[in-house]
Image (cartoon, grey):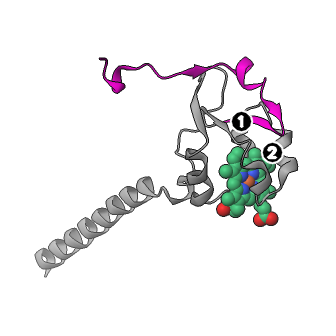
Amino acid sequence: MPEAAETPKKVIPLSEISKHSSRDDLWVAINGKVYNISKFVYEHPGGEEVLLDVAGKDATQEFEDVGHSEYAVEILDQYYVGEGNPEELKINEKPLGVAEFDSSSDSSSSAVKLFLIAAAIAAAAFYYTKVN
Ligand code: HEM
């Protein structure tokens, strides 16, 4: 029996996603993944209308623009149906929901600054002891 891990992921072309564009059969692509949110349409805190606007389409930009919470990203998981075709869809480099918290590059550059300041103080102290 083949291992589950060997099963190739189902890739859903945009042409397939676009067939599901009605209120009762509503698929969207977000960040390269495809979701069947038919059961969520009525529950959406942002209303049905915005979801109908992106029905059967790539909703990555619209989803991001609202600045949805991490909770909203978690909700998506339960409606996952498969992977979209990366050549047809928008994929954000940073994972959804964590973009504004990624400060890793800032913290490393401030560590370098701190080191340079410490080195400058050490050099000044060394010079001071030499001239006096
Ligand atoms: C397809 C998956 C989506 C899920 C699971 C989802 C989920 C949610 C959740 C949980 C909230 C409450 C606030 C939060 O926790 O961020 C929310 C608010 C909102 N959503 Fe979505 N959303 C989706 C797609 C969209 C799209 C495509 C739009 C398009 C414009 C949109 C527009 C909004 C707006 C405007 C609000 C704010 C409502 C308010 O605070 O008055 N959502 N959504």
Does residue 78 belong to the magenta stretch? no
Q: Which residue is drawn at 67% across and 21% down?
A: 88
User: Which numbered circle lies on residue 28?
Assistant: 1
Q: Residues within 10 Å of mark 1 (few under 14, many from 20)?
A: many
Residue 120: image location, x then y, percent: 27, 67
Q: Is mark 1 within 8 Å of ligand 1?
A: yes
Q: In this orientation, does residue 65 appear?
A: no
40 and 106: which one is in front? 40
Q: Is mark 2 within 8 Å of ligand 1?
A: yes
Q: Quadrant of residue 71?
A: bottom right
Q: Distance between the residues labelled 1 and 2?
A: 9 Å
Q: Of label 1 and label 2, which has the lower sequence position?
A: 1
Residue 127: image location, x then y, percent: 18, 72
Q: In this view, does 115 lie above or below 17?
A: below
Q: Which part of the image, by quadrant, shows the C terminus?
A: bottom left
Q: Are marks 1 and 2 in contact (CB under 8 Å)?
A: yes
- Residue hosting label 2: 51
131 and 30: which one is in front? 30
Helix, strand or loop at mark 2: helix
Along the horizontal axis of the image, is 105 left or right of 128?
Answer: right
Residue 51: image location, x then y, percent: 80, 45
User: Which numbered circle lies on residue 130?
Assistant: none
Q: Which amino acid does label 2 sit on?
A: Leu
Does residue 21 belong to the magenta stretch? yes
Q: Which part of the image, by quadrant, shows the N terminus?
A: top left
Residues rendered magenta in the picture: 1-29
Q: How many labels does the image show?
A: 2
Q: Residues within 10 Å of mark 2 (few under 14, many from 20)?
A: many
